[in-house]
Amino acid sequence: MSTKHPARAAPIRLYSMTYSGHGHRVQLLLSLLGLPYEKIDVDPHDGVLKTPGFLAMNPFGQVPVIVDGDTTLHDSNAILVYLARKYGGPSWLPEDPEGSALVQQWFSLAAGPIAFGPCAARRLQVYGEELVPMASAVTIGVKLFPVLESMLSGRTFATGKHPSLADVAAYTYIAHAPEGGLSLEPYPAIRAWLARIEGLPGFIPMPGAPARAPDHPL
Ligand SMILES: N[C@@H](CCC(=O)N[C@@H](CS)C(=O)NCC(=O)O)C(=O)O
């Protein structure tokens, strides 16, 4: 463990799922920051998410959740903010008005068109779960990618020269968009940006989702 991290009695516990992009977003930051953590993968089909014990940690009954000592938090972007403020340097979440607003722009993208576009298309394709109808998810994704392509053209990372929470929040569901049938082939700036994130020390990938067998849903 790096000495810059405050002393902690136990590693941070991360409740996630093997193929959860929201969970991976948190795992990615834990890994990039070099923080010790224990990942507990929940089976989405065994009902544990809706048990009173889990609902006490997250009333929405969803992963990710982290437990860090006396602190229990849900919502991936909120967890990123907590981890960056507590354990990361200021470049992950700048404090100046413009820098923090630029990160917030990407949080809004992550919770908006990324969630209802590429994330929703993949969730339907892989899990058979309809967050929004497939046609809407595809339409949102098809509109989103050219905008992201222009935002990322000529930029090293999402908000400038250094990686920040903006990159961590956006990375996973964009990288795995092809699993939902949305190709990244026409978008060289997006692909180059993904590759730069994958080259960061401590980068950890999310496994590719297995193809869904109609008689054996995930
Ligand atoms: N806004 C939440 C979304 C979390 C979310 O959608 N989690 C999914 C897995 S990616 C989940 O737990 N699904 C199970 C369920 O809703 O029952 C976040 O950012 O953490």
Image (cartoon, rainbow, N blue to C red):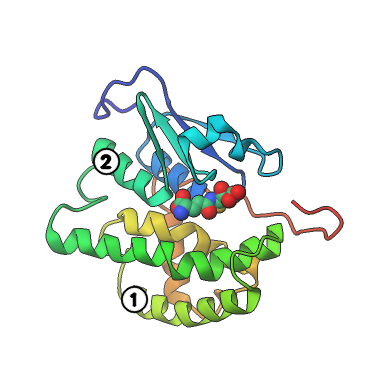
Tell me which amino acid carries mark 2: Gly
Q: Is residue 129 above or below residue 186?
A: above
Q: Name the side, left or right, on which 159 lies relative to 169.
A: left
Depth check, front residue: 129 or 104:
129
Q: Is mark 1 within 8 Å of ligand 1?
A: no
Q: Report, in whole angstroms, how far the alpha carbon at label 1 lies from the one at label 2.
A: 25 Å
Residue under label 1, please give it: 151
Which label sits on residue 179? none
Q: Is residue 90 above or below residue 65?
A: below
Tell me which amino acid carries mark 1: Met
**Which mark is first along the chain, 2 or 1?**
2
Q: Could you tell me which residue is drawn at 40 percent across and 80 percent down?
A: 147
Depth check, front residue: 28 or 54:
54
- Residue 70 makes an appearance in the image: yes
Q: Secondary structure at mark 1?
A: helix
Q: Name the side, left or right, on which 144 lies relative to 119.
A: left
Q: Is mark 2 within 8 Å of ligand 1?
A: no
Q: Could you tell me which residue is drawn at 60 percent across and 74 percent down?
A: 182
Q: Name the side, left or right, on which 50 lies relative to 216.
A: left
**Location of residue 34 (image quadrant):** top left
Residue 81: x percent and y percent?
Answer: 30, 46
Q: Secondary structure at mark 2?
A: loop
Residue 68: x percent and y percent?
Answer: 38, 28
Residue under label 2, please give it: 88
**Location of residue 156 (image quadrant):** bottom left
Check disc 1: other Cα within 10 Å, few if <14, some if 14-19, many if 20+: some
Quadrant into which the N terminus falls = top left
Depth check, front residue: 29 or 68:
68
Check disc 2: other Cα within 10 Å, few if <14, some if 14-19, many if 20+: many
- Residue 21 makes an appearance in the image: no
